[in-house]
Image: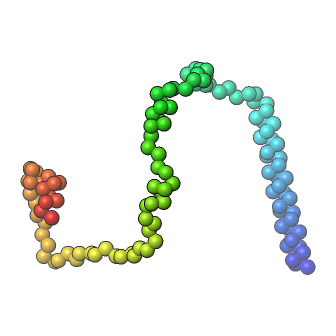
Amino acid sequence: MKKKRALSRNIRDLLILSAVTIFIWIGADVYLALQGPIEIDVPKEQLKALIPGFDRETIEALKKRQIISQQDINSVPELTDFQLTKPETKKASPSATAKTKPLSEEASPSAVLKEQ
């Protein structure tokens, strides 16, 4: 008996929500219809007629592009076996001190890389 009552409540709630949705939908459509057409401002540049011709130079440049054949694609070795490894982590010593240098050629990125 309680299941039947719960089912009828669920159906009632669904019908009420559906009716509210339909009324809002109809109301919004009527409102938009009464507002009149929407004017869209399109720039004159976009309204220009298109020229139905082809740019021969562009077509020739496209023809000269390098084409990769299916044989070339198949010749690339397939990666089937790989192994995941964890990167090594370096632990900082308690007596670590920062090195400072004045800004000069010695402190350039390439010089720092050479030191390492």
Q: Position of residue 29 (x, y in %)?
A: 79, 39
Image vertical order of residue 25 relative to residue 44, above or below? below
Query: In this rendering, does residue 51 appear at all?
Result: yes
Residue at the location (75% across, 30% down)? 35
Q: Quadrant of the C terminus?
A: bottom left
Residue at the location (87% across, 63% down)? 12
Query: In this rendering, does residue 43 appear at all?
Result: no
Q: Left or right? Give the position of 105 relative to 60.
A: left
**Foreground residue, 79 or 50?**
79
Q: Left or right? Give the position of 103 relative to 60.
A: left
**Foreground residue, 65 or 21?**
65
Residue at the location (23% across, 75% down)? 90
Q: Left or right? Give the position of 8 relative to 60.
A: right
Q: Residue reaching furthest bottom?
A: 1
Q: Position of residue 39 (x, y in %)?
A: 68, 26
Q: Quadrant of residue 109?
A: bottom left
Q: Left or right? Give the position of 36 relative to 91.
A: right
Q: Position of residue 42 (x, y in %)?
A: 61, 25
Q: Position of residue 52 (x, y in %)?
A: 60, 23
Image vertical order of residue 27 relative to residue 4, above or below? above
